Amino acid sequence: MYHRIQIVCVAISASLLLAQAGFAEHSQETTVAFDPAVTALFQKDYGTQEAGVLRSTIIAALAKQESRAAIPDGMTLKVTVRRVKPTHPTMKQQLDDPSLSPARSRSLGGADLVGEIRNSNQQVVATVGYSNFADVLPAGAVSLDPWADARLAIDAFAAKCAATWDKLPKS
């Protein structure tokens, strides 16, 4: 039974990643980096492939916002993930600890991100920060996606970035 759940989880994760990649056209003006402590967590606890999942999620959320309000010409955005925690166990966590349930095991997930909007001279013209972690388990996202709460934080961060770059002078 556990093996079937694993296969289903992998299939769902792969299809979500492919769907995001299809909808998110990577903006040349946007880069995503992870704090060294976050990178260490991916390697040790969450699984290195999860960094790609979150990077795709961030780029997709920003691309969605850029389709509504484009980032001004000559501007670039550098996003840094300062903290992140899954709502449900990642595949690596489940493989490392078979007692974890992809549905029943929950934690207070979320994300803390900062974005620097830079002009063509690479000077920071605006900084956008956003952090959101569930306070209590019932306040968390209901999705079984390991990154459900982080996705909510990422979407709010992207909306905040768009509101900021929309106020910047157009070239």
Image (cartoon, rainbow, N blue to C red):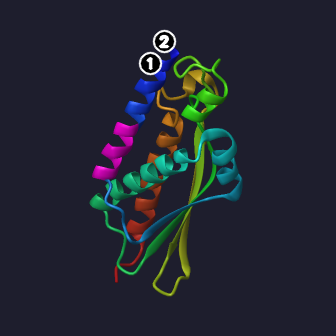
Instruction: Name the outermost residue toward the front.
Output: 3
Residue at 65% from the left image edge and 17% from the top image edge: 99
The residue closer to the viewer here, 15 or 88, is 15
Residue at 46% from the left image edge and 60% from the top image edge: 161
The residue closer to the viewer here, 52 or 143, is 52
**Secondary structure at numbered mark 1:** helix
Residue at mark 1: 4
In the rendered image, residue 121, in percent from the top left (x then y), is placed at: 50, 87
Horizontal relation, residue 119 to residue 34: left or right: left
Q: Amino acid at mark 1?
A: Arg
Residue at mark 2: 1
In the rendered image, residue 36, in percent from the top left (x then y), is placed at: 69, 58
- Quadrant in the picture for residue 107: top right
User: Where is the C terminus found, in terms of image quarters?
Assistant: bottom left
Q: Is residue 143 visible?
A: no
| 113 over 12 or under it: above or below | below
Q: Which residues are magenta?
A: 14-23
- Quadrant in the picture for residue 75: bottom left
| 29 over 42 or under it: above or below | below
**Secondary structure at numbered mark 2:** loop
